[in-house]
Amino acid sequence: MPIKNSEHTFNSISDQNLGDVNISMGVLETIASKAASEVDGVLSGNTNLQTEMGSFIGLNRNKVDSKVTITDVGAIRVDIRIRVAYSYSVPEIALLVQEAVKEQIMFMTDLVVQEVNIHVLSIETGPLQDEVDGE
C-alpha cells in the first residue's frame, strides 16, 4: 500500500508524450476531499476542538477524509468518508460526490479514476446545519 506522500508515475490519456509527471498521493487526496466538501449537503466543518487538535498533531488537513490507492492493475481507487446533513438524500449526495471527485481529478491531473467509494459516517441533525457548504 503506498505511503501518503509517495509519488507515482501515471499514464496520461492524451496522445502527446512530453515527459513524465509524478503526482503525490497526498495531492490526489486533497483534490478529492475538496471536491467532496463542495457538494451541497456534505458537512465539511469540524468542531473547533477537532480542528485545533488535528492541526496540532498534523491530522485533519482536509475536512472530508479521503484515501487514494492504486490497485494491482494500476487503476485509481478513491475512498471518501463524509457526513451528510439531515434532509438530504444519501444516494443523491453519494452520486454527486462520486461525479465531482472523478471530474476534478480528471480536470486537474488528466488521470482517470476507476472507482470512487463513498462511506457515509453519519447523518447530522440540529445545530450542524450551518456547516453545510463550508459556511
Image (spheres, rainbow, N blue to C red):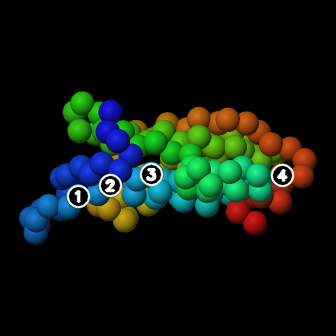
**Crowdedness near tag 4: few (<14), some (14–19) or many (≥20) residues, C-alpha within 10 Å:** some
Secondary structure found at label 2: strand
Q: CA distance from mark 1 to mark 2?
A: 7 Å
The circle drawn on residue 52 is none
Q: Are marks 1 and 2 in contact (CB under 8 Å)?
A: yes
Q: What residue is disc 4 on?
A: 128
The circle drawn on residue 22 is 1
Q: What residue is disc 3 on?
A: 29
Q: CA distance from mark 1 to mark 4?
A: 39 Å
Kind of residue at disc 3: Glu
* Residue for point 83% across, 52% down: 128
* Residue for point 68% across, 51% down: 53
Q: What residue is disc 2 on?
A: 24
**Crowdedness near tag 1: few (<14), some (14–19) or many (≥20) residues, C-alpha within 10 Å:** few
Secondary structure found at label 3: helix
Q: Is residue 134 left or right of residue 116?
A: right
Looking at marks 4 and 3 on the same chain, the residue that comes earlier in the sequence is marked by: 3
Kind of residue at disc 4: Leu
Secondary structure found at label 4: helix
Task: Give the percent coordinates (x, y) of residue 120.
Answer: 65, 36
> From the viewer's perspective, is the residue at label 4 or at label 2 nearer?
2
Q: Is residue 31 left or right of residue 90?
A: left
Task: Give the percent coordinates (x, y) of residue 65.
Answer: 56, 46
